[in-house]
Image: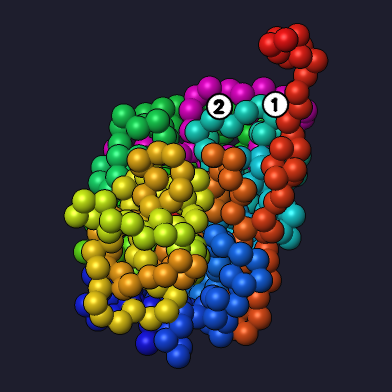
């Protein structure tokens, strides 16, 4: 049986099984592929992230097969999960990368990706980042402002380097979703309007070192409605038709998943049909940049129960993971499912799962049904493979959360838990502070 929040009475049952996950109960214990989560917990303690290599492969290959007839390349949006093991695995299957910083380029190169498969997006690239990207021969820089265009031009002249560039078009599509993850509206900070791109395109064509290759669009994240993509792509094709020499179209990421049963994942069939339609309408190379869709459901955050307390009418389960390990519930009001390691049996109780951080916002899940729990029991927070570990911090003096990858019956720590000395290793107490100490 697939993991589904404990039992058929769970609120989180149906969405989970649809999502090609590798988490399921065997002998009433939650496993990642063939490994009991308790085995890893005994070895390295909690909390930790756990990823399924098989789920990552399945999801990547599923998406690629869906798009097979369209010749679309898949550029993994590394910011969703930039662990070297994850990037290496997806790169090995043929994924390129969409990155938003020089740090992510470093990670991709370290994970064995070719520079010519890396596309550099992002709204505020620094001069040093652009130089680094060009020196390493990345595939393309997606330009998001006139200022950035001028900066690249200057760098090319100064270093006598060529720059393959695309322009990120802002199609003025409101992708809905959470305010903090919408990027394609006219007033969002991302991309450029068509008129500006037409102007910059001719300037780029006239410059000997700037090589304008195409256009890019990315309208936001957690998109559930294929129609929004259709509108954005229609506008993108109109713009491409108005320009000479557009040879590549980067169609962005944002494919939505179902975190809970009231949410529908993107209709992949519909999305694939849309891309097939785009394929018929243009000769340009096509690429997409999914992040979340590839990795979210391939990961869980495993946490130990610290104590269960009653606060008025609420049952609060205090666990050892916190908002600094997984900030999505606090930052985006995200609803992640919670799967007890010991398969749930009735009675189930309406519960809040909260961390030990001194913030009332430190809640990992509201209103989940959980069975009776003892101190030391394990819970897995589902669909935590994207925008989880990458957003972790050391707030409250907590150690950065480790990451584990499981592949069938084997597992490896792919980012270990640092020691407190390591957490403090970049800090010093300077002499100038000593004079201020109270004598
Ligand atoms: C974040 C981002 C993506 C990936 O978004 P997902 O919702 O994770 O698929 C793709 N392209 C760009 C430019 C991004 O900033």
- 388 versus 197 height, above or below: below
CA gap between label 2 and label 1 equals 11 Å
Residue at the spot 42% in from the left edge and 86% down from the top edge: 28
Residue 350 picture quarter: bottom left
Q: Residue at x 54, y 53 (%)?
A: 389
Q: Nearer the viewer, residue 41 or 23?
A: 41
Residue 210 sits inside the magenta stretch? no
Outermost residue to the bottom? 27
Q: Is mark 2 within 8 Å of ligand 1?
A: no
Q: Is residue 226 left or right of residue 81?
A: left
Q: How is the image coloured?
A: rainbow
Q: Secondary structure at mark 1?
A: helix
Residue range of the region highlighted in magenta in the rendering:
144-172
Q: Mark 2 sits on what residue?
A: 148
Give the number of marks.
Answer: 2
User: Any mark on residue 155, and which?
Assistant: 1
Image quarter in which the N terminus is found: bottom left
Residue pictured at 30% horizontal, 82% vertical? 345
Image spot of residue 304 (x, y percent) = 49, 64
Please tell me whether residue 168 belongs to the stretch shown in magenta.
yes
């Amino acid at each position: 049986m697939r993991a589904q929040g404990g039992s058929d009475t769970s609120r989180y049952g149906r969405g989970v099984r649809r999502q090609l996950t590798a988490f399921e109960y065997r002998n009433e214990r939650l496993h990642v592929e063939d490994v009991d989560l308790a085995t890893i917990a005994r070895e390295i303690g909690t909390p930790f992230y756990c990823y399924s290599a098989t789920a990552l492969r399945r999801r990547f290959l599923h998406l690629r097969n869906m798009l097979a007839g369209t010749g679309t390349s898949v550029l993994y949006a590394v910011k969703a999960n930039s662990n070297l093991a994850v990037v290496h695995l997806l790169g090995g299957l043929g994924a390129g990368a969409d990155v938003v910083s020089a740090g992510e380029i470093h990670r991709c190169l370290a994970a064995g990706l070719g520079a010519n498969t890396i596309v550099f997006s992002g709204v505020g690239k620094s001069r040093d980042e652009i130089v680094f990207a060009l020196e390493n021969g990345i595939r393309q820089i997606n330009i998001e402002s006139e200022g950035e265009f001028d900066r690249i031009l200057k760098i090319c002249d100064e270093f006598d380097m060529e720059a393959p560039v695309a322009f990120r078009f802002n199609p003025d599509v409101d992708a809905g979703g959470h305010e903090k993850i919408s990027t394609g509206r006219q007033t969002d900070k991302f991309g450029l309007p068509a008129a500006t791109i037409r102007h910059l395109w001719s300037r780029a064509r006239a410059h000997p070192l700037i090589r304008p290759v195409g256009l890019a669009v990315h309208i936001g994240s957690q998109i559930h409605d294929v129609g929004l993509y259709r509108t954005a792509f229609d506008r993108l094709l109109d713009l491409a038709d108005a320009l000479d020499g557009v040879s590549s179209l980067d169609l962005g990421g944002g494919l939505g998943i179902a975190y809970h049963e009231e949410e529908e994942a993107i209709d992949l069939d519909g999305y694939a049909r849309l891309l097939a339609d785009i394929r018929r309408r243009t000769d340009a190379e096509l690429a997409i940049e999914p992040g979340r869709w590839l990795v979210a459901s391939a990961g869980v955050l495993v946490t130990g129960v610290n104590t269960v307390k009653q606060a008025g009418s609420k049952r609060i389960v205090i666990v050892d993971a916190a908002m600094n390990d997984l900030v999505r519930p606090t930052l985006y009001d995200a609803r992640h499912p919670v799967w007890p390691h010991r398969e749930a049996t009735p009675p189930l109780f309406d519960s809040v799962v909260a961390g030990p951080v001194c913030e009332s916002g430190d809640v990992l899940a509201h209103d989940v049904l959980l069975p009776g729990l003892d101190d030391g029991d394990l819970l897995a927070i589902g669909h935590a493979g994207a925008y989880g570990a990458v957003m972790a911090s050391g707030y409250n003096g907590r150690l950065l959360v480790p990451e584990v990858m499981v592949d069938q019956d084997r597992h490896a720590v792919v980012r270990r838990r640092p020691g407190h000395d390591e957490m403090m290793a970049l800090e010093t107490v300077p002499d100038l502070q000593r004079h201020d100490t109270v004598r």
